[in-house]
Amino acid sequence: MKVKINDQLICIPPYISARWSQIAFIESQEEEGKGQTTLKLHLLDGKVISIPNLDQSIIDIAFHEHLLHLETSQLTHIKEDSIREDEKVGMNMIMNILQQVTKGNDIQVLPKNFISPLFAGTNPIEAILQHIPEHKDHSDAPADVLEKMAAVIRTLAGNNATLLPKPEPHCNCMHCQIGRVIYEEDHITVSDQDLVFRTWDIIQSGDKLYVVTNPLNPSEQFNVYLGTPIGCTCGESNCEHIKAVLYT
């Protein structure tokens, strides 16, 4: 087996093969008068592995890779601390908003044995809006409250659809009520009529008389008469307003 040292592990047969995470610190000692250097690896369990007569280049590599491991670990810890702080802020935000939205309503959002997401190690949205079978007969929350809560959850979930609550059939807990609102919003059916681009809105106001209005500018309005003679208040005899009424 060959010597292998990188920022994850150190392997110097037959002395040691371990991850840097198992090693507390390392040091080298040069024996006086012999010109030989010993590398000492202090393990987390208190053991010390001494490797004598190592080439200086190997010792230099060991120190370099161990330093890389320490720097990487430090960055990882900083990132994890930052994530935990963001989750704490997110949880507090959710709790405050839900309290404001549900104020004055008999709404049960949290389970009886609720554990803070900071201690449970779960996502704040998943922990706070978890499915609660014991609330299956919960009364319907006001529509405006559900819509506000759904909007809050959507915003905090961002583009991560997996964080959105999934409604369970025959359950009316707040998780499922909000989940159904979000599901219905995502599956709104648009009719073919709604998809047609309208140039003019046309309303019949009398016998052969129509009011033609620009939907983008309601102040742009004309009266079209389809009697004899055909005419439009715009003054043109073959205008688009007359055509719009004829072809509607």
Image: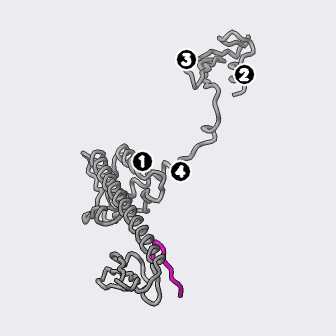
The alpha-carbon separation of the residues under discs 3 and 1 comes to 37 Å
Q: What secondary structure is marked by label 2? A: helix
Would you say residue 196 sits in the magenta stretch? no
At x 71%, y 20%, the residue is 240
Q: Secondary structure at mark 4?
A: loop
Residue at the spot of label 3: 219
SS under mark 1: helix
Residue 167 rendering spot, x and y as whole percentages: 43, 59
Using the image as rendered, state which of residue 206 and residue 176 is in the foreground: 176
The answer for how far apart the CA atoms under marks 2 and 4 are is 36 Å
Q: Nearer the viewer, residue 218 or 65?
A: 65
Camera-side residue of 80 and 187: 80
Label drawn at residue 172: none
Residue 3 in the magenta stretch? The answer is: yes
* In the displayed structure image, the side of residue 103 where residue 218 appears, left or right: right
Dot 1 or dot 2: first in sequence order is 1
* Residue type, mark 4 in image: His
Residue closer to the observer: 31 or 175: 31
Relative to 36, is 176 above or below?
Answer: above
Residue depicted at x 70% and y 19%: 242
Nearer mark to the viewer, of 4 and 1: 1
Above or below: residue 160 compared with residue 145: below
Residue 13 percent coordinates (x, y): 47, 88
Mark sitting on residue 243: 2
Q: Magenta residues?
A: 1-9
Q: In this image, 184 relative to 111: left or right?
A: right
Check residue 187 in the rendering and tell me which mark sits there, or answer none.
4
